[in-house]
Image (spheres, rainbow, N blue to C red):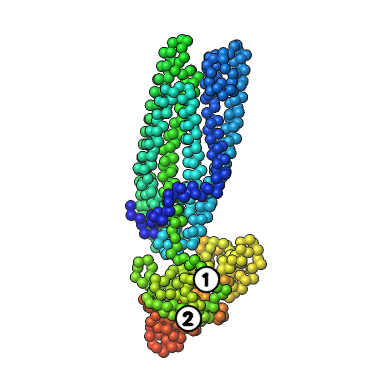
Amino acid sequence: MTDEPGGFEDVRESVDGHPMWNLLGYARPYWPRITLGVLAAIVTRFARLVPPIIVATAIDRVVLGSGEPGLLTQAGLVPGGELAGEAARLALLQRLVVIAALAYLVRSVTRFGSRYLLQSSAQKIQRDLRNDTYDHLQHLSMDFFATHQTGGMLSILNSDINRLEQFLNTEFRQLIRVVATVGGIAIVLWYYAPTLAVIALAPVPIIGVASAGFLTWIEPRYKSIRETVARLNTRLENNIGGVAVVKAFDRYAFERDRVADQSDQYHDEKVAALRIRRGFFAGLRLLTGVVFVLVLFVGGRAIITTPPGQTALISTGAFAAFFLYLRRLYSPMRRIGRSANKYQLAKSSAERVFGLLGREPTVTEPDDPHVPDGIDGRVTFEDVSFGYDDRESVIEELSLDVPAGATVGLAGATGAGKSTLVKLVPRLHDVDEGAVRVDGRDVREYDLQALREEIAVVEQNPYLFSGTVAENIAYGDGDALAAERRGETDQRERVVAAANAAAAHEFVSALPEGYDTQIGERGIKLSGGQRQRIAIARALLNDPAIIVFDEATSDVDTETEEQIKASIDRLIEDRTAFVIAHRLSTIRDADRVVVMDDGEIVESGTHEDLLAASGEYATLWRAQADERAATDLAESD
C-alpha cells in the first residue's frame, strides 16, 4: 500500500542495522540484573521438572514396589534397591514429599526473582527508549514536522514503544521458557526411554521451521497493519483536535465515514492476519495430537506385551511422567507461533522507533559552534532564496539589512513570504542559497541554543500548554519555569511584570485563581486575544535581543491592540524587532516598513515615504483606512 503523505513508512529507511539488535543495545546497561533474571528463570523451569519425576518414582517404587533405580536414585536423593515392608515405602514417600516441597519452594522464590528482575528491566528499557526518542524528535528540524503527522508521532512514542516493552517483558521470558523446558524435558525423556523420546521430540524441529516460515510470510501483513493504525490514529487526532470546525460545519457524517473507512481497512487487515494465525496454531495442535497418540500406543503396547521378569521399554511410572512432560513440552512449543507474531509486531514497531532515531535533523550545528557572550541584534539577509522541500521557492534572492535595535514592519498579502523570512533567523529552516547573518556572522555558525535564546517569536496562533497562566508565561525563562513547577513564587514578580508589559495583568487578575488558573489544553479557556497577550508576555520574559511578532495583535480589539502596541513600543526600544502585521496601523511607527510580494521586496521605507510613493503600501493603507472609517460610522449609528 502506498504510504499516505505525512506517514512514517519512510522512516524505516533510516534504521541503522537490525532494529531488534538495536533494541537489545538498550538492555546492555542492565545486563547484571538481566543475567540474574535469566538464571533464576532457568532454575524455575528446572524446578518444574521435578514433580513428574517424583510421580514416576512414587508409582514405581512406593505403589508398585519396584526396585528399579530412577533419576532421583541416580542423583542420590532417594535410596536404591528393593523396599522391604510398609515402613520403608512410607519413609520413601515422606522423602519424596520433602523433595517436592523444596522443589515448589525453589520454584516460587526463583519465579518471583526472575519476573521482578526481567520485568523491571523491561520497564527501564522502555523508559530510556521513550526518553531518547522524544528527545531526538524534539531536535529534528521543522521540515520533518511539516511532512509527518502528529498522530503518527504519538503512535511511535506510545503504542510502538509500549509494544517493545511488552515484547521484552513476555516474549523474552518465553524464549527462556522454551529453551530451558525443551532442553530439560529432552534430557529426562531420553533417560527414561530413548525410543519414545525420539517420537516425542520429533515435532520440535518441525515447529521451529514452520514458525520461521510463518514469520516470513506474515511480516508484510503486520507492517501494513501498523501503518493502518498510524493513519487511523492521525485521523482520530485530527478530528478530535478540529471538533469545533466539525460542529460548525455539521460534518459529523463526513468525518464518521472517513473514520469508518479507515476502521474498516484496519478490521479487514486484522481479521485476515487473525485467520492466518489461528490456522497456524490449529496445525500445531494437530501435530502435537498425533505425537500424543503415537506415544500412547507405542509405550502402552510395550508395557502390555513385555513378558514377566523382563525389563520393559518404559516403566509404568515413567510412562505416566511421559504424558505430564508432553503437556509441558508442547505448551511452550505451540507458544512459538504466537511469539513469532509478537516478534513480527515488535520488529515492525522497532523499525519505526529506530528509524525515527536514525533520522538526522537537516538543521545542524558545526563541529565548533560559535557561542556569543551576547547578541547586539543586527540581522542581514544576503541574496536569500528558500523553498519548502522540492516546491517552488518562497523567498527569491532577497537582501535586507536590519541594524541592531531597529524595528522592521513586514507587510504584504498572505503567502508573500513574510513569516517564512523571519523563520530563517532562528534557523527553524536553513536557506537554500545566500546567507542570514546575525551580528555579521552566518547563523549556521552559531550554537543553536545560544542563538535561539536571543530570539523570541510570538505567532499569530500561539500555542499554550495545559497548565496555569503563570507556568505558560514562565515558559519563556528556564529559572522562572522551574520555580513555578516547584510551586515556588520567587520568580513571580518577573512573571507579573511581563504580563503587565503585554497588557495581560488586568484580565489575568480577574481570573478565578489569578495567575494560578488552569487554562486547559491549548489555552482553550482563554479568548484568542488573551492567548496572544500571554504569548507576548512569555516572549518578553526571555529578554531577547531579537523579537518577532507574527500577526501578534490579529485577534485583539482596537483598544487592546493599542495597549499592546504601546507596551511593545517601550519594550523593543533597545531590541531588534520584526513585526508582521495585517493591520498596517500596527507598523506605522516602525523604523522601516518592508512590503513583500511573491517572496521579493517590492517596497521599503518609512510609513510616510511609502504613502508618498503611492505604491502598493499606500493602496493597502487607504483600503484599511476606509474600512476603519466605515466601522466607526456603523458603531456611531
Task: Find numbered disc 1 in the image and state the secondary structure of the residue it sits on.
Answer: loop
Q: Residue at x 43, y 53 (%)?
A: 16
Which percent across, then down, holds residue 46? 53, 31
Q: Earlier in the sequence, mark 2 or mark 1?
A: 1
Other residues around mark 2 within 10 Å, as few (<14) / some (14–19) / many (≥20) = some
Q: Spatial distance from mark 2 to mark 1, Cα to Cα?
A: 21 Å
Q: Residue at x 61, y 61 (%)?
A: 485
Task: Tally the marks.
Answer: 2
Q: Residue 301: which quarter of the image?
A: top left
Residue indicated by mark 1: 370
The vertical placement of 276 against 446, above or below, is above
Q: Is residue 202 visible?
A: yes
Look at label 1 and name its amino acid: His
- Whether pointer 2 and pointer 1 mark residues with C-beta atoms closer than 8 Å, the reply is no
Task: Find numbered disc 2 in the image and state the secondary structure of the residue it sits on.
Answer: strand
Q: Residue at x 57, y 17 (%)?
A: 80
The vertical placement of 279 against 289, above or below, is below
Judge by depth and name the residue closer to the eye, 3 or 35: 35
User: From this viewpoint, which residue is outermost toward the top?
Assistant: 308
The vertical placement of 278 against 224, above or below, is above
Look at label 2 and name its amino acid: Val
The vertical placement of 72 against 362, above or below, is above
Which percent across, then down, holds residue 341? 41, 42
Which percent across, then down, holds residue 477? 58, 68
The numbered mark at residue 402 is 2
Q: Residue 197: which quarter of the image?
A: top left
Camera-near label (2 vs 1) is 1
User: From this viewpoint, which residue is outermost toward the bottom?
Assistant: 612
